[in-house]
Amino acid sequence: MSFANDTFTGTNGTTLQSHTSDSGHSWTKLTGSDMQINNNTVYNTTFSVTMYYSSAIPAGVEYDVEATIKTLNSSKNGCGVGGRISTSATTFYSARFKSTPQWELNKYIAGVATLLGSYAGDYPSTAKVVKLEIRDATKKLYVDGVERVSSVDNEITAAGRPGVGHGAGGNDPWTESWADNWSSTNFSAGGGLSIPVAMKYFRGMRA
Amino acid sequence: MPAKYYISPIIGNGSEDNPFRAKISDYPGVSCSSIIPSKPDGTPRFTWTLVYVSGLDFSALDADLEIKDVFEKFASGVSFGEIQVFLKSKTVGDLAVTKRSAVQTYLTALGVDLTGVTLSTQLWDVVKRVKNHLDPNGQLDDLRVG
């Protein structure tokens, strides 16, 4: 169950910082250019590195952030998602598609970019779901549910916030590269049974 | 897909279009994951990195004199699982003397602690020492792409 989500439903041209998410949270631009709503998706209006964070606060330092993204072709930079985003410095982890072309797992510390890992394949010329899985032991990038990059980096340790950013479609129009269906979900180390399943299990034992 | 461990220089300046990264990541057709710990200002703590690389053709990497196959082309696998099994099944003593000497020389030059490594030490443990020199966080198993 996500603790924050957004389908970016709104009026075309609305900046993300003026938009309220489906879960009722606001967006703050940490760095870069404005992202705008277009046809109920969100896109970056320039090439500059951009990251927004949600006002939603994760329950702990381990959580997932995902979104559906698409770029017109592999030469276009794609949008991406971020996690452990600092609200005071350009510091975060991100998973995104870049026109290199490849999927990238990145680390930004004080605005300095480091590429931790990359995967050449699964270009998002059709919509694909990118997920950034944040655990203390690993940071993983998934594409359509398949793990593509895993890193052991854990230098950004504060929970921070989940977010959305990166991307810019290339030449024109910018809307060739967009993100949609963004959400963030807390990680429960215990996992285990949901309450309904657990109730059924215990009732079965009693019978 | 075939996979190997390499040691690569770190290139870049930390900008969006030129991030700090393993030189290997600039080669087309390969996927990779690397360990690049950062200083507080975001710049890399080391000038080199351990890289797990997956790809169909490593010839371009092997021709780059700045990039080192950790075990001098002795070890590779068609998947992460296979290379892991291979490295756990082989020991330092399985390396030819010339390759063993070359590996020892460049790992020592990089500052990797090889104290206690003997001919019976698993090659997997040698890679773990390289990883732990760069970053003790996490497990070598979690450095992968696929």
Image (cartoon, coloured by chain):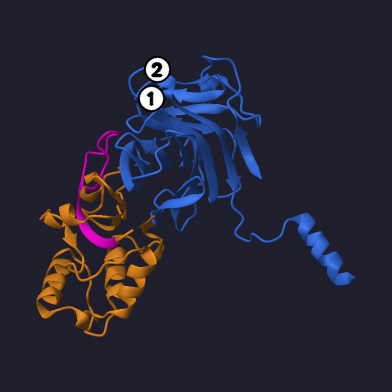
Chain colours: A blue, B orange
Observer-nearest residue: B82 or A97?
Answer: B82
Is B9 one of the magenta-colored residues? yes
**Mark 1 vs 2: CB contact within 8 A:** yes
Left or right? Give the position of B68 relative to B16: left
Tell me the element at label 1. loop
> Vertical placement of A104 versus B80: above or below?
above
Q: Position of residue A65 (x, y in %)?
A: 53, 42
B133 in magenta: no
Choose top left, top right, bottom left or bottom right for residue B106. Answer: bottom left
Q: Secondary structure at mark 2?
A: loop
Q: What residue sits right under mark 1 in the picture?
A: A169
Same chain check for tags 1 and 2: yes
Marks 1 and 2, how far apart at CA: 7 Å
User: Would you say A193 lies left or right of B125 here?
Assistant: right
| Identity of the residue drawn at 28% across and 79% down | B90
- x then y, percent, for residue B111: 19, 66
Circle on res. A173: 2
Point out the stretch of residues depicted in magenta: B3-22
On screen, residue B128 above or below A106: below
**Residue placed at 35% from the left, 29% from the top?**
A76
- Which chain does tag 2 point to? A
Give the amino acid type for the residue marked by disc 1 in the picture: Gly
Q: Is residue A188 visible?
A: yes
> The disc labelled 2 sits on which kind of residue?
Pro
